[in-house]
Image: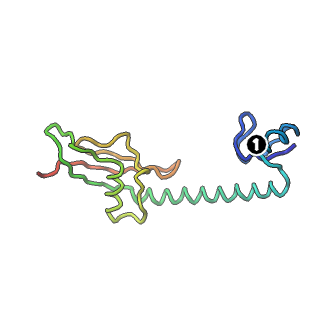
Amino acid sequence: MKLILKKPVESLGDAGDIVTVKAGYGRNYLIPQGLAYEASSANIRRLEEEQRRAQERSRRDYLEAHRRAAQLAGMSLLFHARAGEDGKLFGSVTNADVADRANESGKLDFELDKRSVVMEEPLKSLGVFAVSVHFHAEVDAEIEVRVERAES
């Protein structure tokens, strides 16, 4: 019996795979559990169309991520913060602060989301840091973040 998997099934395949299984396993387990549906010619055509659309969407997302990363290339953000004598900040600079400052710069034609800004932990000292921005599984960009002492 030929089936198209709706969800990944261990030791059988991933979602969208066309698999051949014994009729009882397909009729009594895979189909009733919602894990697969019959691989008729109409369903196979529908699956191929969905895969084609998914590839187009993936390519569009990849190109858009590259475009956004190019806008961030060479961007430098300056933060003034109060700090102690040893250079430790009395607060911190977070990913939300970086995203807000980048959006306020007026150089971007999109809204940078704070969840895209990747930081192990907030910046808590004076200095220059490279902060990564994740747009796509294959596309990252870096922003230079300068944290300087605020004039009291």
The residue at the point 80 percent across, 42 percent down is 19
Counting from the top left corner in percent of width and height, residue 109 is at: 41, 66
Q: Amino acid at mark 1?
A: Gln
The residue at the point 83 percent across, 50 percent down is 39
Q: Which quarter of the figure is the N terminus placed in?
A: top right
The residue at the point 34 percent across, 46 percent down is 130
| 145 on left or right of 110 | left
- Residue 82 shows in the view: yes
Counting from the top left corner in percent of width and height, residue 18 is at: 79, 46
With respect to residue 84, does 99 lie above or below? below
Counting from the top left corner in percent of width and height, residue 56 is at: 63, 59
Colour mapping: rainbow
Q: Which residue is mark 1?
A: 33
Q: Out of 36 and 142, give the one closest to the viewer.
A: 36
| 10 on left or right of 37 | left
The residue at the point 13 percent across, 52 percent down is 151
